[in-house]
Image (spheres, rainbow, N blue to C red):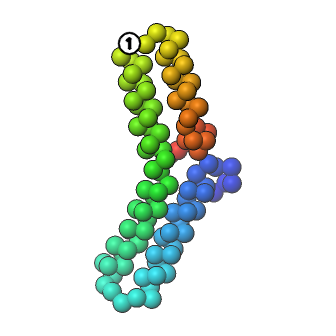
């Protein structure tokens, strides 16, 4: 994966969690299903951690858009609210691509 891809670090973090879970379960007794479940849970935890910031940003942006769409604000008030909201977003949410 190219280093200039904004998702590279996210993928690496998730991959490390997977490898750790695989290595941890390989040395332990347990059924194949239990080991698969442990790896699945590690993937899910890493994925949830990596994308929680985006979920929060989307929720905030949705609320702001609903307020603007309500028509209760003037054009300038809407623009100011949009600017303030964008300024408060974390850099990772503003400048990174997600897919």
Q: Residues within 10 Å of mark 1 (few under 14, many from 20)?
A: few
Between 50 and 39, the one nearer to me in the picture = 50
Asked if 66 appears above or below 95 in the picture, the reply is above
Q: Residue at x 64, y 49 (%)?
A: 5
Between 11 and 45, the one nearer to me in the picture = 45
**In the rendered image, which quarter is residue 13 located in?**
bottom right
Q: Residue at x 38, y 12 (%)?
A: 72
Q: Residue at x 43, y 56 (%)?
A: 48
Q: How many numbered marks have been drawn onto this rendered protein structure?
A: 1
Asked if 18 appears above or below 49 in the picture, the reply is below
Residue beneath disc 1: 72
Outermost residue on the right side: it is 3
The x and y percentages for residue 96 are 59, 42
Q: Residue at x 43, y 44 (%)?
A: 55
Outermost residue on the top side: it is 74
The x and y percentages for residue 37 are 34, 73
The x and y percentages for residue 44 are 40, 62
């Amino acid at each position: 994966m190219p280093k200039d891809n904004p998702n590279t670090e996210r993928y690496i973090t998730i991959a490390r969690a997977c490898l750790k879970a695989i290595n941890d379960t390989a040395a332990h007794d347990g059924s194949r299903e239990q080991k698969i479940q442990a790896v699945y849970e590690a993937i899910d935890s890493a994925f949830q951690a990596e994308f929680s910031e985006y979920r929060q940003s989307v929720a905030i942006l949705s609320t702001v858009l609903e307020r603007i769409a309500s028509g209760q604000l003037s054009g300038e008030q809407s623009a100011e609210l949009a600017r303030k909201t964008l300024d408060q977003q974390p850099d990772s949410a503003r400048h990174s691509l997600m897919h």
